[in-house]
Amino acid sequence: MTPAEYYQRDRRIHPPALTPDYKTSVARSPRFSLISLQGSVSETTGPVFGHGDISPIDNDLIKNYAKDGDPVGERIIVHGRVLDENARPVPNTLVEAWQANAGGRYRHKKDSYLAPIDPNFGGCGRTLTDENGYYFFRTVKPGAYPWRNWVNNWRPAHIHLSVFGNAFCQRLITQLYFEGDPLIPLCPIVQTIPDAEAIERLVAKLDMNAGVPLDCLAYRFDIVLRGRRSTLFENRLEGN
């Protein structure tokens, strides 16, 4: 591999662990210094995902759970590329997605929001990037939903994305929002991010050229691993 420029990690853009306006962080933030643990062989050597593990409609959330028709909601495509810090494509990478339905409800036993479950929408999918690092999902646009933070907080419409490397310990998780959503600047979780440009990199942009006429709109969301334009990841600082 050709040596490339090293990008120093910028810790200033990552949310602090304790952000009291996001009430859950009060209980979740560590009280003591973190302990570094060496990864086991099973964590650092597998698994390796191949096309045989992915069905042809795993990335089509409109079809992959439907039983009696299509799910309710605005049909959209979410697409983009997974890139390294020097804009090189990252091929054969497993990308997973999960989301609420068009009413803002997850198919999860602990989701008690009053919006109904959609019998034709499972809310999750997966795909592998191609040789150019490209991925795409077809789905319905998720709805906003209330959450118990302060009196009347709502989460903006969002989709969770997981990117797997070559081993379990290389999994990174983020979430994308949608351009123009008025709830983004009001969300206490989003506003834990101290850098406005980092927030902007979590917003999928409307892409009219990738939409299907009379069918669906499209949004583009590139995922950048490390570097100065990196996507902000929820679970690990390594991506930043």
Image: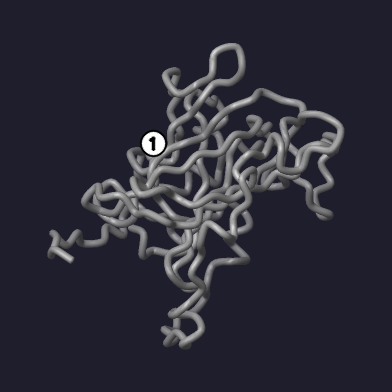
Rendered view: 225 above or below 31: above
Rendered view: 193 above or below 152: below
Which quadrant holds the C terminus?
Answer: bottom left
Residue 196 appears in view: yes
Nearer-the-camera pick, 126 or 18 = 126
Residue 151 appears in view: no
Nearer-the-camera pick, 36 or 19 = 36
- Outermost residue to the top: 214
x then y, percent, for residue 124: 67, 47
The number of discs equals 1
x then y, percent, for residue 131: 35, 49
Q: Which residue is mark 1?
A: 200
The residue under the point 63% across, 30% down is 141
The residue under the point 59% across, 48% down is 97
x then y, percent, for residue 15: 43, 55
Q: Secondary structure at mark 1?
A: helix
Nearer-the-camera pick, 13 or 9 = 9
Which quadrant holds the N terminus?
Answer: bottom left
Around disc 1, counting alpha carbons within 10 Å, would you say few (fewer than 14), some (14 to 19), or many (20 or more)?
Answer: some
Q: Is residue 220 left or right of residue 175?
A: left
* Amino acid tagged 1: Glu
Nearer-the-camera pick, 185 or 53 = 53
The residue under the point 58% across, 50% down is 126
The residue under the point 75% across, 31% down is 103
